Image: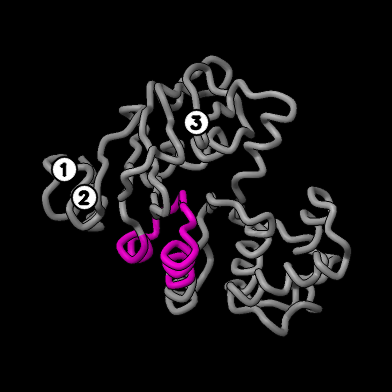
Amino acid sequence: MSQSPPVIEVKNLTMGYDGKVVLKDVSFAVDQAEVFVILGGSGCGKSTLLKHMIGLYAPMAGSVLIHGQDIVTAQGRKRRDILRSFGVMYQSGALFGSMTLLENMTLPLEEFTALPKSAREDVARMKLKLVGLSGSEHKIPSELSGGMQKRAAIARAMALDPGILFLDEPQAGLDPVTSAGLDELILSLSANLGITFVIVTHELPSIFAVAHRVIMLDAKKRGIVAEGAPDWLRDHSDNPLVRQFFNRKAEHLQ
């Protein structure tokens, strides 16, 4: 994708709970402006890996470098600077239900910048426009469709102009048409603004629509079983589990 150094490097990451290893010795890198997808079957550790990458959980071993800085060991101001360099959209959207979209958008700006109120609101309106929600500033989340809530959550994740966005199951619960519109938004933001996306999903139409590259996790192997472009993995992988996943074939019971 890029000749510059990776914006994210996961090195020898081992993670788990109560002494039980979920993923072991996982390593990969994500390039600038890449749409990178983490996928796999249920229980393989997709969302758990994402939570380690954004610093919510501490790994058993290994490192997560964001722009060369290790979020695992960073403390104080250095950790705060790393956290400000990316935005996160959670599966539920995580919008505050009692606040308007404008208030939701300005909240991170109020906390992390010294901008006056008028400037914060201008930035918020600009972000909402980027995701196609101009004119919805004074609506509360319950007044929005599921797709609009997801777009609003992406807008809020972009409030501080991060170069990286992490999205957890962005298409979950959306109808095919709405999901396709969200895919187009992701591709547009990546191409036009140079935003790097790391997306956890198992939605095959969206994976084929947006992903430049994917890694596939497997619960039994406790690691990565495939990496590459989704079209290539579907058509050429020598791993039957990978071909089965990408060709949406049922596992036959023995």
**Magenta stretch: includes residue 192:** yes
Residue drawn 38% across the image and 45% down it: 31
Residues at marks 1 and 2 touching, judged by CB atoms closer than 8 Å? yes
Mark 3 highlights which residue? Answer: 68
Can you give x and y, in whole percent of width and height, for residue 132 in the image? 59, 79
Q: Is residue 138 left or right of residue 11?
A: right
Name the colour scheme.
one colour
Reply yes or no: does residue 134 show up in magenta: no
Image spot of residue 107 (x, y percent): 81, 57
| Disc 2 secondary structure class | helix
| Distance from Cα at disc 1 to Cα at disc 2 | 6 Å
Q: From the top left corner, tell me how far across and down residue 93 is, in percent.
A: 65, 59
Majority secondary structure in the magenta region: helix
Closer to the camera: disc 1 or disc 3?
3
As shown in the figure, which amino acid type bears the numbered disc 1? Pro
Q: Quadrant of residue 156?
A: bottom right
| Mark closest to the chain's N terminus, 3 or 2 | 3
Residue range of the region highlighted in magenta in the rendering: 184-210
Asked which secondary structure carries label 3, the reply is loop
Left or right, 20 with reference to 31: right
Relative placement, left or right, of 139 versus 188 is right
Instruction: Give the residue type at disc 3.
Output: Gly
* Label 3 crowd (10 A; few <14 / some 14-19 / many >=20): few
For mark 2, what is the residue? Answer: 244
Q: How many marks?
A: 3
Up-down relation of residue 189 to residue 56 (above or below): below
Q: CA distance from mark 1 to mark 3?
A: 36 Å
Q: Amino acid at mark 2?
A: Gln
Q: Quadrant of the C terminus?
A: top left
Q: Secondary structure at mark 1?
A: helix
